[in-house]
Amino acid sequence: MDLSIIIVNWNVRDLLDACLASIYASDLDPNDFEIIVVDSASEDSSAEMLRGQHPAVIVLPQSENIGFTRGNNLGLARAKGECLLLLNPDTELSPTAIELLLNYMRAHPDVGIIGPHTLNTDGSHQSTRRRFPTLMTGVFESSWLAAWAPSAIERDYRMLDTDDDDILEADWVQGSAFLLRRAVYQDIGGLDEGYTMYSEELDFCRRAKSVGWRVVYHGGARITHHGGKSSEQASAFKQIHFHTSKLRYFRKHHGTSAYMVLRSLLLLQFSWQLALESLKGALGHKRELRAERVRVYRQVLRSGLKANV
């Protein structure tokens, strides 16, 4: 079999249905691919929808929410394809997207991983190609300090010095649509399950490049990513896992000192945000919003943002 498409689903039934419909409407020969959906104990009738509307899909139902990384590893272990596409359920593919990625990979045997040009729901560009982060990137990325980040850090990390429509060498591509060769999986194994969600594709690409595989971004292969619909269901959960995953990556690839510096700065930032939101709430400014943010920041600080390797 040429291709296995692996989708981890949690309570996004309608988006999953649209994703599957876009796959079947693509230029792919239905005999050349399989679709595996790992369902993490969804409570929105996802399993019933799959049985009724997409009976050809292989469903691996779980008794609990096992997370994005472990779910993908279960799909990878079950897959038969020579190429393996990890695909978010909140994506929709253009008719030619997968075929363009596959053709490029077939023509370039040293390319182990390739990602598409990703669009937001409104058709605007979504940044999904990256260079490896530095410690300074870790300090500023998706944190309270992001507004003060030097422009050169953002430009370098997000490859803003390159064209969105080009085919480019990258250090890593984001996991919303992530095509890899079976040979890469055989070389380095699956995703590191120490990452429940976030940074697992960064870690995977770093491991793949360390054994000689190239990573490529394909600006001509387009998908739409509606963005984070599973993780939106739990804000504190999202914050904790985003930052602990980032810290795990830095501890694993940059050492304990980098991890300790970054963790201390993140905890300091969340402590400051907690104090600021508490003060604004006490002064009567948007009290419901402030109360929700205080609740989230307390949960983040209570977690300690500890990342073991």
Image: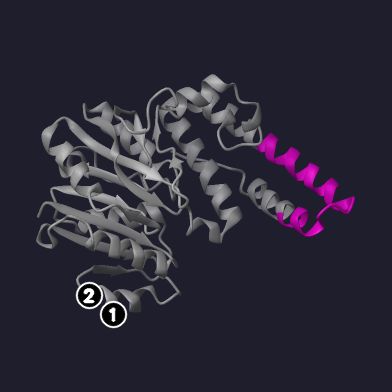
Which residue matches tag 2? 55
Which residue matches tag 1? 52
Residue depicted at 41% across the width and 51% down the height = 225
From the viewer's perspective, tell me whether residue 208 is left or right of residue 293: left
Magenta residues span 267-292
- For mark 1, give the secondary structure: helix
- Quadrant of the frame with the N terminus: bottom left
- Quadrant of the frame with the C terminus: top left
From the viewer's perspective, tell me whether residue 144 is left or right of residue 133: right
Where residue 87 sits in the image (x, y, percent)? 32, 53
Q: Which mark is residue 2?
A: none
- Spatial CA distance of label 1 from label 2 is 6 Å
Q: How many marks?
A: 2
Q: Which residue occupies the foreground of this view, 164 or 215? A: 164
Q: Is residue 257 visible?
A: no
Residue depicted at 65% across the width and 31% down the height = 147
Tag 1 near tag 2, CB within 8 Å: yes
